[in-house]
Image: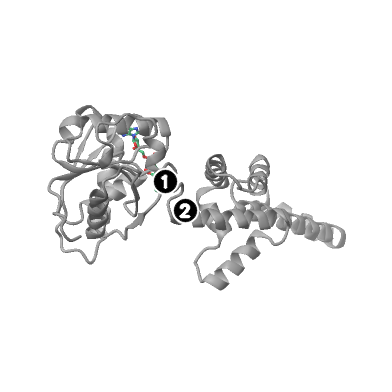
Amino acid sequence: MEGIQKPQGSVVIIGAGTQGRRLAHMWSSRGGTVRLVDLQEQQLQDGLKYVEQLRADATDHDGDWGQIETSQPSSLQSTLQDAWLVVECVPENLQLKRKLITQLDKLAPEGTIIASNSSSYGIFEIIEGMNLKNSKRVMSAHCSIEIMGHKDSDPKLIDLVLGQCKEHGFSPFHVKQDSIGYIYNRIWAAIKRETLLTLSEGVATPKEIDAIFKDVLKTPKGPCEQMDVVGLDVVLDIENHYAETRSGIPTEPREYLREMIQGGTLRFGWFFCIIGLVVEFVVAIDEARVRFTDDAHLFFGFCRWNPQTR
Ligand SMILES: NC(=O)c1ccc[n+]([C@@H]2O[C@H](COP(=O)([O-])OP(=O)(O)OC[C@H]3O[C@@H](n4cnc5c(N)ncnc54)[C@H](O)[C@@H]3O)[C@@H](O)[C@H]2O)c1
């Protein structure tokens, strides 16, 4: 980024869970210091181990890894003192995120950029109605890839974060307007929605949809297999969030999901697994019946002496 100075100081990541530890690894990969904060000491220790493992596995790195220091939220003010960027990475709970952003706005030095890693709440939703000291420095940085400001964000700070994300090995994109679902997740939501609608109309089976999708787009997984990675309950939560905030979202995909979940199916794969087991069981019973009628003695004789069948 021309005209923008390289920032000095550390990156503070609040929350050492699944995503926080990944970010700690990336943001320390160019020699800079990362300060990892979590309420739970175990999460901090597990996070450090996770990063150590990634570093040990890295084959094309120059060895200039930055330090990762851990601390508790009770010392947040001092942890933030040299931070150029702080990323909140606590669980996806709007009230928790609002509380933390308020705290960061109060405690972080004036020059510290404050970012949220939330996957479903845009920064414009998180700070809505809040009276922040300096809202210009607040933004969304979803996975440090989708960078989205709000109506008062300072564009120079957005550029700075985009540039630094790139420097640290991410491939960042600027989300230029308030957007629930950022860029990628909106497109992905449309694919999931249409997949579920197609299924609800009985047009094709999950297996067929995955097969045609993979054939045409050459992706390793189809949409049903991808939905299985997070679980259908999470897919429904996400779709509910879109439906609450946008008009024109069809109801059928959500109804279809609700029925699947109420029927105890959280993954299309399980559905097939269960169907497969039922088919195998019926075939086995049928084979046994045939044996029983046609070769009963042999069948019972076999049962008597083979310990594995008892
Ligand atoms: N998991 C993913 O793959 C993923 C991907 C993209 C975005 N995200 C987003 O990242 C955020 C974090 O998700 P995650 O999956 O890492 O969650 P997680 O539950 O794995 O980790 C959250 C961590 O935050 C800690 N924590 C909770 N309250 C805290 C507080 N007040 N102060 C300090 N630490 C606190 C918890 O102890 C926990 O270690 C969410 O907003 C999520 O939407 C996650």
In the rendered view, would you say 80 is above or below 238? above
Drawn side of residue 80 relative to residue 127, left or right: left
* Image coords of residue 303 (percent x, y): 73, 53
Whether residue 306 is visible to the viewer of this picture, yes or no, is no
- Give yes or no for contact between labels 2 and 1 (Cβ–Cβ under 8 Å): yes
Whether residue 147 is visible to the viewer of this picture, yes or no, is yes
Instruction: Report which residue position mark 1 lands on.
Output: 119
State how far apart marks 2 and 1 are (Cα): 9 Å
* Image coords of residue 225 (percent x, y): 55, 58
Q: Name the kind of residue labelled 1 in the image.
A: Ser
Measuring 68% from the left and 43% from the top, which residue is drawn there? 259
* Image coords of residue 275 (percent x, y): 69, 54
Drawn side of residue 253 relative to residue 7, left or right: right
* Mark 1 sits near ligand 1, with its Cβ under 8 Å away: yes
Question: Considering only order in the chain, which callout, 1 or 2, is on the residue closer to the N terminus?
Answer: 1
Measuring 55% from the left and 55% from the top, which residue is drawn there? 190
Q: Quadrant of the N terminus?
A: bottom left
Instruction: Report which residue position mark 2 lands on.
Output: 185
Q: Residues within 10 Å of mark 2 (few under 14, many from 20)?
A: some
Q: Name the kind of residue labelled 2 in the image.
A: Asn
